[in-house]
Amino acid sequence: MKILGIEHIGIAVKDLDTSSPFWSHILNLQHKGKETVQDQGVLTDIYDTTQGKVELLQSLGEDTPIGKFLLKKGPGVHHVCFEVDDINKAIKELKELNIQVLSDTPTVGAEGYKVIFIHPKSSGGVLVELAEKP
Ligand code: CO
């Protein structure tokens, strides 16, 4: 697989209204947009450094991946996302290498990217997302 760069860092927040001003007004990052990703039970709010983005993640309920993460660990870094040239090729290679991926096929994430997640057990404790640009 070919990694093209860090696409974004995913950060779990309790409340976008209180968390987003740091990224928008203190770091002055360009706002890309807010989007609900029903599949993952999350409201995303994305900021762009032009060399990798920050993806704020507010859960849509306690029984969602971000809701559970917040209950267990509280707000903070949730995952790191790398852009890949070919997501299906990446999944195939990872499976051949016995790396645990959370789904067999990509799902559509924020901004229309095709995404998969690698289990933290396979990566030394970091939830890794791979994404292919739409
Ligand atoms: Co992400």
Image (cartoon, helix red, strand yellow):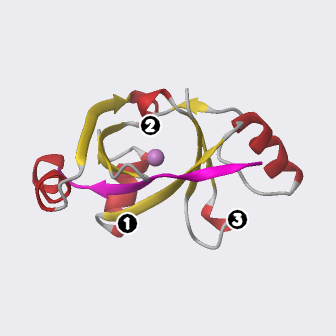
Instruction: Tell me which numbered mark, 2 or 3, is placed earlier along the sequence.
Output: 2
Percent position of residue 126, x then y: 56, 66
Residue 69 on the magenta span: no
Determine crowd level at label 3: few under 14, some 14-19, many 20+ residues with C-alpha closer than 10 A. some
Q: Name the residue beneath numbered marker 3.
A: 122
Residue found at x 44% / y 48%: 65
Q: Position of residue 118 (x, y in %)?
A: 64, 54
Q: Quadrant of residue 100?
A: bottom right
Q: Residue furthest bottom?
A: 124
Badge number at residue 40: 2
Please tell me which of labels 1 and 3 falls first in the chain: 1
Q: Residue furthest right?
A: 96
Q: CA distance from mark 2 to mark 3?
A: 21 Å
Any part of residue 131 in sight:
yes
Residue to which mark 1 is pinned: 72
Q: Which residues are magenta?
A: 1-15
Q: Which residue is painted at 66% across and 67% down in the image?
A: 123
What's the distance in space between the residues labelled 1 and 3, CA to CA?
Answer: 20 Å
Which of the two marks, 1 or 2, is nearer to us in this view? 2
121 or 7, which is in the foreground?
7
Please tell me which residue is depicted at 72% across the width and 36% down the height of the picture.
86
Residue 125 image label: none
Residue 104 in view (yes/no): no
Q: Residue 133 placed where, x, y %?
A: 56, 33
Disc 2 marks a residue whose amino acid type is: Gln
- Badges 2 and 3: C-beta atoms under 8 Å apart? no
Kind of residue indicated by mark 1: Lys
Relative horizontal placement of residue 112, taking residue 50 as reference (left or right): right
